[in-house]
């Protein structure tokens, strides 16, 4: 087994075994915080929607139904400077850790909204994306997304978020960020190692495929 695949397997097993979760958050308090914001920036629902569905055209991710520990880690990373976004940081930098965990609990307990019909995508592009997501491209040392993100790419714990049903524009932007060393807050830079091996065509294909998938088990 190649070194990269061994590392990915180890992290996936650790996440599955530990069942990492965020410290207790209060979803009701999180709902209030999402509506009012941090006192200086825009409220969460201004970008992510009242139902947490996000916005593909603007590149705002769906938050509803994502793992609470993952959401909390990302917000804490923004506030610590470990993850950078000129949009996110000014809007959450006045939240303390407990408020962040309350927000994470709120979004994690939200029902996943019914997805809008994705824009038509060429079947060959979707087939390429499906292969990358579920089988990888081992000739070029690219593991399948599901080796970390779990069955159906619906997430595994704090480190590997659900990406099935996530907005394609957001997926594309984040892979590009890892590829260009603009994001590196993942375990042992696993995503960087994968993203730098992907071509632009492959990124478009896997983003389109994942965006076309159901975010919930059927």
Image (spheres, helix red, strand yellow):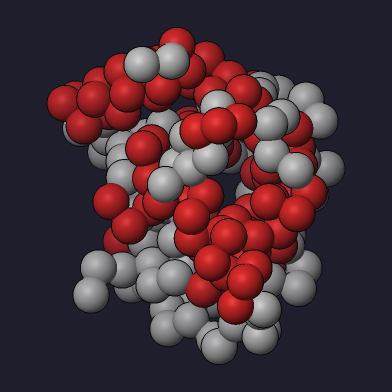
- Left or right, 214 with respect to 192, comes to left
| Image height of 174 relative to 57, above or below | above
Q: Is residue 117 above or below residue 110?
A: below
Of 197 and 137, nearer the camera is 137
Residue drawn 51% across and 73% down?
212
Q: Residue 201, relative to residue 175: is it above or below?
A: below
Residue 86 located left or right of residue 185: right
Placement of the C terminus among the 4 image quadrants: bottom left
Residue 19 drawn at (x, y percent): 20, 32
Which residue is located at x 54 percent, y 86 percent? 116
Q: Give percent across and percent down for residue 204.
A: 71, 58
- Give the position of the N terminus as an image quadrant: top left
Residue 42 horizontal side relative to residue 208, left or right: right
Q: Is residue 50 visible?
A: yes
Please tell me which residue lies in front, 114 or 52: 114
Picture coordinates of residue 187 (x, y %)? 49, 20
Q: Nearer the viewer, residue 56 or 72?
A: 56
Q: Is residue 108 visible?
A: no
């Amino acid at each position: 087994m190649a070194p990269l695949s061994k590392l990915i397997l180890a992290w996936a097993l650790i996440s599955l075994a530990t069942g990492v979760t965020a410290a207790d958050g209060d979803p009701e308090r999180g709902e209030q915080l999402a509506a009012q914001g941090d006192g200086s920036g825009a409220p969460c629902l201004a970008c992510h929607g009242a139902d947490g569905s996000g916005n593909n055209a603007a590149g705002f991710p769906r938050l509803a139904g994502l793992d609470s520990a993952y959401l909390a880690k990302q917000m804490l990373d923004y506030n610590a400077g470990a993850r950078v976004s000129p949009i996110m940081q000014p809007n959450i930098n006045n939240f303390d850790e407990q408020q962040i965990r309350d927000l994470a609990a709120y979004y994690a307990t939200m029902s996943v909204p019914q997805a809008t019909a994705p824009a038509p995508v060429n079947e060959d592009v979707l087939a390429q994306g499906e292969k990358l997501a579920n089988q990888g491209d081992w000739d070029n040392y690219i593991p399948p997304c599901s080796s970390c993100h779990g069955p159906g790419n619906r997430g595994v714990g704090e480190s590997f978020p659900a990406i099935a049903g996530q907005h394609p524009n957001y997926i594309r932007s984040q892979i590009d960020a890892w590829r260009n060393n603009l994001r590196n807050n993942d375990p042992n830079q696993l995503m960087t190692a994968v993203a730098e091996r992907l071509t632009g065509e492959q990124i478009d294909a896997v983003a389109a495929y994942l965006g076309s998938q159901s975010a919930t088990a059927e």
